[in-house]
Amino acid sequence: MGWVSKTDRVGPGRNTDEAFPARPRRRRHVALVALLAFAAHLPAPPVAASVAGEYSLKAAFLYQFTKYVAWPSEPDGPVDICVLGADPFGRALDEALANKKAKGQAVVARRVDSASAGAGCRILFLSRSEQPRLDAALAALGTRPTLTVADMAGFPQRGGMINLRLEDERIKLVVNPDNAARAGLKIRSELLRLAEVVRN
């Protein structure tokens, strides 16, 4: 399973991992491994309360992605984590992001009603309700530096970047770094080592 790198600006010829001091990077990696270990034992959601727990955990993943992906530029305002389509998180996303920061900027949850409206988001979660319109939504985003995340079958193979998949009563990460690279994003090696990696 895999995760993504911190949003540091990386100059030409500079390895992304070199931009991060080793000790803080190690602490982040330990936290990520702990979250993934917990996710691996999340029971399948047979009732609404379990579904709420599943999406609380997925909300925590969305925030952690801000630390494991390198964007082509630093944020100059709030870091938006957006949801497109029917919102499965309820208040879980807002609660997970409360008082959180990324690169010194506040992290906020937003709901958007179109892919073009989500083009300014650092991270865009595409709900399962968008599956019939997925190709059009991803085409609307084009190569904008927006990390796309979903929990629908075949998402990384259709142009998405990270899929949060419930399989055998466990949450697994499926990552397509090629799709991320096309948008100018670099997913850190720590995340990739913990994920199932698919390529184009």
Image (cartoon, rainbow, N blue to C red):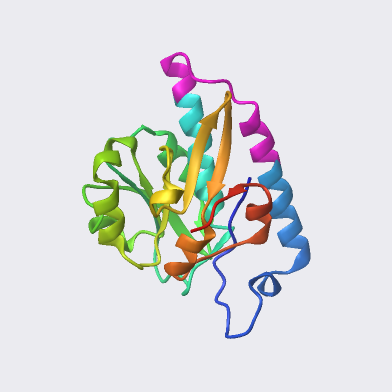
Residue under the point 36% across and 32% down: 88
Q: Quadrant of residue 16?
A: bottom right
Q: Is residue 100 visible?
A: yes
Residue 19 in the image: x percent, y percent? 66, 74
Residue under the point 57% across and 71% down: 8
30 over 41 or under it: above or below: below
25 over 128 or under it: above or below: below
Residue 166 in the image: x percent, y percent? 52, 30
Q: In the displayed image of the protein, which residue is found farthest to the top?
A: 47
Instruction: Report the magenta stretch's main SS.
Output: helix
Q: Is residue 98 visible?
A: no
Q: How many marks?
A: 0
Residue under the point 28% across and 59% down: 139
Q: Is residue 165 magenta-colored?
A: no
Residues drawn in magenta: 34-51
Q: Quadrant of residue 15?
A: bottom right
Q: Is residue 38 magenta-colored?
A: yes
Q: Quadrant of residue 24?
A: bottom right
Front in this rendered view, residue 149 or 121: 149
Residue 80 in the image: x percent, y percent? 38, 56
In the rendered image, the quadrant that contains the N terminus is: top right
Q: In the displayed image of the protein, which residue is found farthest to the front?
A: 200
Residue 149 in the image: x percent, y percent? 43, 48
36 over 6 or under it: above or below: above
